[in-house]
Amino acid sequence: MKDPAIIRNRMKIESAVRNARQFLKIQEEFGSFDAYCWRFVEGRPKQNRWKTGREIPATSAESDAFSKDLKQRGFSFVGSTIIYAHMQAVGIVNDHLIGCFRYRQIRHSDSAC
């Protein structure tokens, strides 16, 4: 708690420990955390078609369901906005703008999933 280089909020520290334990339970139940995550999009990346950054949402029905499920499993600090950002970061959701070169690259790699 005295180290200024790390999070010093007791609730967040306790949450990290609790979430790690729950993470291991999910791995055991589903074989991997990855397998668990992909259930929320039926195993295929969600390909959005945004033209402007203003269109990109902070949450989705899928991130709402994902967040709710994690909370029911005992996780904390896993709101829908955080989970949507996770889904974007790991490629579960493609929110690149349709004019972006990465949108096309990721869309074409979808067939490999």
Image (spheres, grey):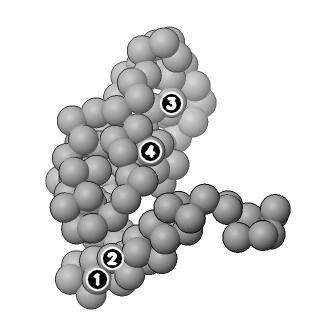
Are circles 3 and 4 on residues that touch, CB within 8 Å? Answer: no
Q: CA distance from mark 1 to mark 3?
A: 33 Å
Q: Quadrant of residue 24?
A: bottom left
Label 2 residue SS? helix
Are circles 2 and 1 on residues that touch, CB within 8 Å? Answer: yes
Closer to the chain start, of discs 4 and 2, is 2
Q: Position of residue 92 (x, y in %)?
A: 37, 49
Closer to the chain start, of discs 1 and 3, is 1
Q: What residue is disc 3 on?
A: 96
Are circles 4 and 1 on residues that touch, CB within 8 Å? Answer: no
Q: Position of residue 108 (x, y in %)?
A: 42, 43
Q: What residue is disc 1 on?
A: 25
Kindly identify the amino acid type of the residue bearing the numbered disc 1: Lys
- Determine the residue located farthest toward the right in the rendered image: 4
Label 4 residue SS? helix
- Report whether 53 appears left or right of 38: right
Q: What residue is disc 4 on?
A: 82
Specify few, some or many for label 3: CA neighbours under 10 Å numbering under 14, 14-19, or 20 or more: many
Q: Quadrant of residue 101?
A: top right
Kindly identify the amino acid type of the residue bearing the numbered disc 2: Gln
Q: Residue 20, relative to residue 86: is it above or below?
A: below
- For the N terminus, the quadrant is bottom right
Residue 22, disc: 2
Q: Residue at x 45, y 66 (%)?
A: 15
